[in-house]
Structure formats: C-alpha cells, structure tokens
Amino acid sequence: MSKIDDMVLELFDGDQQILTAVGFDEAFVGIGVQFNTPVAVYDYVKCIDILAEEMDYEDAIEFFEYNVIGAWVGEQTPIFLRYPENS
C-alpha cells in the first residue's frame, strides 16, 4: 500500500478514493478538499525534478505545464502546490 493509500484510509476510513498523478508519488504532500471533494496535492517543484531525471529541466517544465497541470481529468483533478522559495 502506498503513502497515498495509507493517508486516504486514515482520513476517510476507506470510504473515499482519490485520483492520483501517476509517477509523482515522491512529490505527494497530502490531501486537500475542494468543494467537499478530496484531491491529491503535490509539490510542483518536486514534480518538475522527477521529470527532469528523464529530460532537460526546461523541457520538464514545459511538459509538466502542458500535459499535467493543463489536464482536466474531472472533479478530482490533483492540485499542484507552488510556494515562495524564501518563505
């Protein structure tokens, strides 16, 4: 069972399922709630870093922005958290 599955089980007693972003488990930071719907939350920078292991960093940003963030996959579409580096 993954860290994400464990958290869903703990928070929702297994009564909920969430949509996850495949390949980004190491960037998972928690579960948010959007309009009473639980959604997976990922660290934006860590997602880019994961992609950059397989491609140029600038290409990773472009790919992520277009293919991941730009994809609406329903009301459980994951959220990608960005935060100021110096906070």
Image: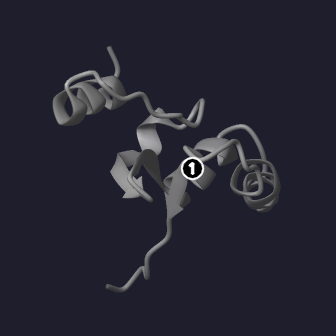
Name the colour scheme.
one colour
What's the amino acid at mark 1?
Cys
Can you give x and y, in whole percent of width and height, for residue 35 in the image? 44, 59
**Circle 1 Cα neighbour tier, 10 Å, few/some/many (<14 / 14–19 / ≥20):** many
In the image, taking residue 50 as reference, residue 11 lies left or right, namely left
Q: Position of residue 52 (x, y in %)?
A: 67, 48
Residue identifier under label 1: 47
Q: Residue at x 65, y 41 (%)?
A: 53
Taking the spot 29% from the left edge, 31% from the top edge, the residue there is 8
- Judge whether 36 appears above or below 83 on screen: above
The x, y position of residue 11, in whole percent, is 20, 36
In the image shown, does 59 or 84 lie closer to the viewer?
84
- Give left or right: position of 80 versus 37: right
Residue 85 at x, y = what percent? 42, 79
Q: Is residue 26 above or below residue 6?
A: below
Q: Is residue 84 above or below residue 63?
A: below
Residue at 44% over, 58% down? 34
